[in-house]
Every structure is written in structure tokens, then in C-alpha cells.
Image (tube, grey):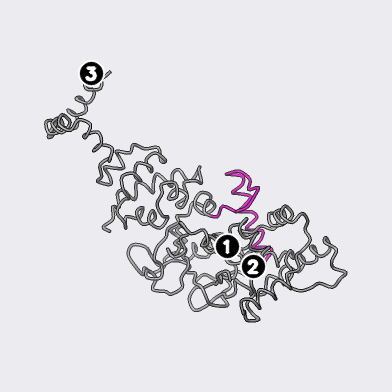
Amino acid sequence: MAGNPAFGKRIRDLREARVKTDPTFSLRQFAERVGISATFLSKVERGEFDPPKAEHIITMAGLLGVDADELLSLANKVDPELEKIIKEQPTALPDLLRTVRGMSAEELRKLTERAREQKD
Amino acid sequence: MAKVKFLKRDEIESATLCLLADYGRKYGALAVPPVPVEEILEAHLGLTLDFDDLRTRLGTPDVLGATWIQDKAVLVDEALDPTGDRLREGRYRFTLAHEIGHWELHRHGFLANAGHPSLFGDKPAPSIVCRSGSRNDPMEWQADTFSGYLLMPKEMVLAAWQRRFGSLTPYIAKDEIADLSAKWGLADDQQPTVDAAKEMARVFNVSGQAMQIRLIGLGLVRTEQPPPDLFDATSSVSSAIGREGEALAKPLAISAYGGHREGFWKEKMPV
């Protein structure tokens, strides 16, 4: 268990900010709502254990009111939903991803915006 | 080590009632048990709670919890983590309430004496280490006493007893204790937990032993047959409450205090 201090600290900071006004964000209640043990959460937050699996991170993001992708990328994980999405268009979507690979974040953002407009 | 100020039982009880009232003002009054100890520790007092293998980390056997006053951090041994095992809740909650007791009653002594030598990593040695099975440390006795009062406040216990049994008439547990002791082959100094205490323990989410001590202290459970003139409910309850200190002083389940380092305490597992 290598641990991921950056991810752990982010979760602890978010949770401690919430617990001051909402006691249901206590270590054990939060762990219970996420579906992991309190000891595991404690060690993840202190950077001793690796982050939990993606499904649990997405639940954490929902409870803490932050973007799941932010937490997933901190944890070096990919939303498992993406695999399902790719399988819906198993030729076109991998092709799209390979094509845009190497573009800058700004270029990708513009491209996403255009795609969104086209979709609407 | 900080010098421990002598505290009377009622001073410790007042400290728990003030804490509960402060919590109630911030988060809504506590009407019914169980007392939310984690919320008091983490939300109200702003202490950080963590679980760890304290036995290995501190190199101390039987350690239950430790408090770092300067860091505002409480560590509980991971063997006490009650996740997935409700039976461990009582012991776990007692440990948390005990550490809250150190924070409320003893932190000033440690804040004034800042700077403990570092034993490991980036975290200095804990201010207070709490272990099971030892004797005669006033600080640990105070934290244990605090824990009992915090988890089982008098008014809440009386109200719960009245709701359950319809009056404040004490339960004379002498026969049940004798039967249980015979059944389990217990020694004279071991007291089995009676059903009424087990039932109330579930309501307060504490161990049966801790609940029984509190009920005996409040005179709601009596281990001896009282003389006939004490059978009147009101007088027997109030006279028993008057003797609370004496009754609670008997080391029934939470038995051992003090010891060779900064202090240890013991809560026997329910029989």
C-alpha cells in the first residue's frame, strides 16, 4: 500500500470543512456512507493507503459536492463509466481519442465545446 | 507530565453537562440517547479522529487510545473500529468519550507544557496514552468518570428508564445476579450484567457493564435487597442517588486506573 498523500489530504480537507457544520461528515459516518471501513478511510486520508476504487471515489465526490473527475484524477483513476461509453461505439470512439491525443488542454476544451453545440 | 488537579465527581459531571449543552446550542438539543460522541469530538471540538495500529506504533501493549493535545488529534487503536460489528460500539464509544474527557479536563496542563520529545515520524509523542488494565492514575480515573457521565447523562437515563419501565422504581437485581453468577460460574468479584442493564445499554449504545455501573450509581439497579421501608419508589431512588458516589466508587466493570506511564484504564468486556 504505497499511499497517495495528495488525494488523502484533499479528502480530509473537504470532509473537515463540512463536518464543522454537518456532523454526518464525521470519519465513521462518512466512511459508512461511502461504504468503506473507518480505519481504511483514516489511513487513506493520512496517505498511508492507496485511494479506494473508482466507485467509492465517485460516491465521495457526490457527498462532498465536488467534481468526481477531479478526485479521480488525483487518485490516478479513470471513471469506470468511460469503458461502458467507449463500448457503445467501439470503433468510432477509440478512433476519436487516438486522433485528439497530443492536443493541448485548451484545444480539447474548445473541441468539447464545439461538440456540445453540435449535439444540441 | 502535567500535574493533575483534584476533581470531585460532581465537578466532572458538570463538565459533561456543559459540554452537552454547548453541543446542543450549536447542533440542536439532544433529546434522546445515544449521545453522539463522534460528532462532539470531531464537529464540536474540532479534534481529528484517526484509527491506527497503536500497539505497534507506540510499542505498548493493550493501548486503546491516545491524545495529542497540541495537534488536536485523537488516535484510537484500530482493533476498536466498530465498522461492521455493532458489538464493539460500546467499548469504542467509551474510549472516545474518555479521550474527550482528557481534552476537556486536562488539555490546559499540556498546552502550558508544550514540546514533547518526538518518538516517531513527524508526529511527536502523544500527550496522553490510555491503556487497559492498570491502576491508580488520577487523570485516567477522571477521564473514565467523565466518559460514564457523558455517555449516560443522569436526566437522560432517568427518562429512558421511566419510558421503558413506567416508573422510577428500582430493580432489585440480587436474585438475577445470583442466578447468572451460578449459571456462568463467576467468581464473587465478577458481576454479571442483568437484562435491564443490557436493554438500557442498547438504547445508550454503551456496553452492558458500563450501563450497569451507571444504573447502580443512580440507584435504579440495586444489587442488595433493601429493607422493606425503602420499597417506596421515590424515596428509594432519591436516597440511592444521594449515595451515587459511594455506589459508583466500587470497581465493578471499569476497574483499573493508573499505572506506569501517563495512565491506563480498563473496561472489561461484557460477560
Which quarter of the image is occupied by the C terminus of chain B?
bottom right
User: Between B168 and B68, which is closer to the camera in this rendering?
Assistant: B168
Is residue A92 left or right of B80 when viewed as pictured? left
Q: Within the magenta stretch, is there residue B198? A: no
Is residue A16 left or right of B224 when viewed as pictured? left
Q: Within the magenta stretch, is there residue B17? A: yes
Residue depicted at 63% across the width and 57% down the height: B16
Q: CA distance from mark 2 to mark 3?
A: 74 Å
Q: Amino acid at mark 1?
A: Leu
Q: Position of residue A90 (x, y in %)?
A: 17, 33
**Label at residue A118:** 3
Q: Which residues are magenta?
A: B8-37
- Residue ID for mark 2: B7
Q: Please, what is the dominant secondary structure of the magenta stretch?
A: helix
**Label at residue B105:** 1
Report in which chain the residue with disc 1 lies.
B
Q: Nearer the viewer, mark 2 or mark 3?
A: 3
Which of the two labelled residues, at mark 2 and mark 1, occupies the earlier sequence position?
2
Labels 2 & 1 near each other (Cβ < 8 A):
yes
